[in-house]
Structures are given as structure tokens and as C-alpha cells.
Amino acid sequence: MMQLYNSATRKKEEFQTHTPGHVEMYTCGPTVYHFAHIGNLRSYIMEDVLEKSLRYTGYDVNRVMNITDVGHLTSDADEGEDKMLKGAKRENKTVMDIAKFYTDAFFSDCEKLNIKTPDVVQPATGLIDDFIHMVEGLIEKGFAYFAGGNVYFDTSKLNRYYVFNDHNEEDLAVGVREGVEEDTNKRNKNDFVLWFTKSKFEDQALKWDSPWGVGYPGWHIECSGISLKYNGEYLDLHCGGIDNAFPHHTNEIAQTESFVGHEWCKQWFHVHHLNTNSGKMSKSKGEFLTVSLLEEKGYDPLVYRMFCLQSHYRKGLVFSWENMDNAVGTFNKLIGRIANLKPGDDVDQAVFDELKAKFVAALENDLNTAQAMTAVYDVLKAKTTDATKLALLADYDYVLSLNLLEKAEAKRQENAKAATAKTEGGYTIVGEGDPAIDALVMQRYEAKKAKNFAEADRIRDELKAQGIEIVDVAGGAQWKKI
Ligand SMILES: [Zn+2]
């Protein structure tokens, strides 16, 4: 059985679902005002591993994610600037252009990291009527009030304002932010906005009619509204970065449970921060770390995925270029070992089952991905046929999603090419296995040796005309098709 740490109870618990065998899963999606930071993407990678682990161990999963394209203020609470508007101003574009551009960029990053797209992806701007309906319901039930042009959730009406226990009164006070003007319309300091018609930024681009005037929804209501619509009234698993626990998730719980009148979600899964040696990563300090930056520096995004898998999602992970270089070394060695396996023998089912059980146990142990990676090495070390090993690795890779077999195949082809290296008279030609080309490269070498440079150049041009590039290296030459 899957055991997961639950932020709501602060314990590792057996994962239970409202309907046996079926998981209703919700993930807080990105605010699409900028490129995703690889620290945020760590959460999406681990949530992807969680979803795939559930499917792998036999659950059927309905996963829903929002896209925040309105209402998310820079402070996470109700003060500050609108993040979307800030992005639009920075780039001199409309808010909808910004949303489209960065939504596409987010999914492109996800694809490079082998993160599966959730079953339902809903931009907040597409569901405004549902949010209005929910706010109306909360007012009717006495959990919300209208003051100074905005609708607020009244936290004093709750038996308990749920705060994930990690937060005490002091944290709450900080959560409400020092240095930010207090909103005098609020009856209680933790009350939060469900619907804005008045805010500090009058030039809010996206506005809708509502019973309370023209305005826009608060950030928290969107996740509750979207989840209720696509996951139903009983959510099994809610995910997000640890940053979202307070106030976002706390407020989601308050408003959703008040609206539906019963407990909403039992299991809360939070992924911890990616840090640098100098502390928590911040977008405002130094390099803005994106998937594109990794690629520009020559790192395969899947190496970053493996780097995340090597540590537990509830521990802070330290990012540095040195750590990435180590991960590259580990990844290449791993692929090299898999490339040496020879397919074709029989799969030993008993060994397969025995080893697979270890991998499943690692995943079911609060998604212990580091242990799951160890299970990969256990396969490589096992005394069994290569076919059994390859079958196991293909099976594990459904969850790990590191393209282990595809990359090993590419490596095998590379090795096969290298194996076509031909040495004659101390001169080694490494090519792509075409003896006619090898012969021309050798003729060019002979011409050069005889100081017939015109002939050597003629052969180089002839090869070039055939789309062949030659690179002279110590003790020989390499050629490849370009
Ligand atoms: Zn959310």
C-alpha cells in the first residue's frame, strides 16, 4: 500500500481514496506571468512521479490542474501587484498575450522534463461564472461578507482556521505581511478576498460583471472552484509546492469545506524548496534558472529530472552547477551500463517480480525516489539475463521517465559507429561505417603525407559535396554526415 506523508496530519499515513482504486488529484498550476523557475519545476517533476507511481501501482487517476492567468498578487495574500499585469507591463503586451506565451512555455518545459500533462488543465479566466456561484454560496451560508467593494471570507466563522500546524500565530502575522498597508475592510486579520471590485491597481486588465460589481476573483477561489468542477466534492490528493501551504491551501480548505459542508481533501502533498548554497532560490537574485538556461549551458533537461529524483521531495535540494556536473557523470555512466546489456534472451519472470517488488516498495515508502534509483542499480547488479534487466528498466522508466532505454539505444549506436574505427599504418579513422568514405579519407591522408595538398583539398571538397564533414584529430580523423 502507498504510504505518504500528509501535511494535514504531519504523519506518514496509508493513502486512502474516497472511491477504492480511483484517485481524484489536484495540482496547483503555474501563474503564467514569467518562465517557470527550475525550483518550481521540481514540484511538477515530483508530482508527476507521484501520479505515475499511483497509476503504476494500479490506481486510476483523474488529475486536474489550474493555470493562474488572473488574480494572483505578488504577495500571495491580498496585497501587492497583480502578477499578470506586472508581466504585461514589463513586456508591453496584453495580459492574455502574456498568459498564452507563458502557458505554452510552461508546457514546453514540462515536455522536455517528461512531465505528463494533467487530464484536465483549466485556465482560471475560463471559469469565472463558477467562482461567482461559489462566492454567492459562501455569502448565503454566512461565511463571506461584502465590505468596501470587495467580498471577503470571514475566518471567524470557522471552527478552526486550518493552517497545516507548521504555522503558528506568529507565522500568520508574517503571512499577512509586514510593511503592507492593512486592509481596513477586513473584520479579522486572516480574512481574505474572494472577489475584488476595488484594489490598489485600477488598471486591472481583466474584469467581469458580478453581483458585487465589475471585478475579478481572488487567487484562492480559483483552485477551489476548478477542483470542485472537475474532481467533485471529495478530493483525494492535493499537491503543490510547500510555499503554497499558507495562505493558499489554508484558504482553499476554509472556503471549500464551508461551501460543501463536509471534509474536502484528506491528503496534502507538498514538495520542498530547491535551494542554492547561499539560501533559498529567488527570481530576483542572480541568474534566473530556467530549462532554457540548462539547455544553453549544454545540460540535458532529463539530467535535471534525475537530479531531483536522487533526493526526497520533503527535503530541501541544493542546486549548483557542480551538482549538475556530477549528475551528468552519474547519468552518462548509468546509460553506458544499460547500453552494454544485450537484448534477446528470455525474461526470467521470477527474478523480474522479485526485483520489481523492491522498486514498488521504494515508491510506496513516501515516494522515496532515491531508493527507487538504487533499485535501478540493483537491477544492473543482479545475476540474471540481460533481457530481464532490460524488461525491468523499461518497466521502471514508466515512473522515472528518464528515457533510459532510448538513450541507451542511442549510446549503443554511437558505440557501434566507434567500433567501425579503422586503423591503417597508425592512422585511425572513426566514421559511420561506410567503407567507401573511409577509403576516401585514407586517400586524403596519403595525399597529405605526400605533400600533395591540392589533391587532399580536392578530396575534402568531394566529401563535403557528399555531405561529409572531416575533423582531423590526433593520430587520425573522424567523419560524420552533416
Ligand atoms: Zn492552488
Image (cartoon, rainbow, N blue to C red):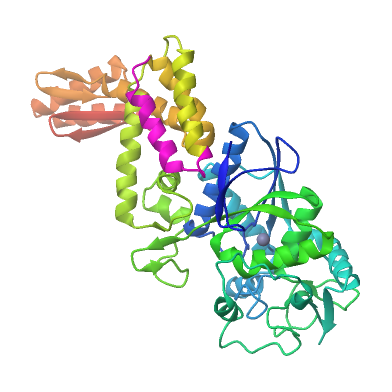
> Residue placed at 26% from the left, 20% from the top?
419
Count of number-bearing discs: 0
Q: Is residue 398 above or below residue 276?
A: above
Q: Quarter holding the N terminus?
A: top right
Image coordinates of residue 62 in percent, x first then y, are: 71, 42
Where residue 438 sits, quadrant-wise, is top left
Q: Nearer the viewer, residue 248 or 36?
A: 248
**Is residue 41 visible to us here?**
yes
**Within the displayed image, which quadrant is ligand 1 positioned in?**
bottom right
Image coordinates of residue 248 in percent, x first then y, are: 65, 67
Q: Is residue 450 left or right of residue 235?
A: left
Where residue 211 sits, quadrant-wise, is bottom right
> Residue placed at 18% from the left, 31% from the top?
454
> Residue placed at 29% from the left, 54% from the top?
322
The stretch of residues the image draws in magenta is 364-384
> Residue placed at 18% from the left, 34% from the top?
473
Image coordinates of residue 69 in percent, x first then y, are: 69, 64
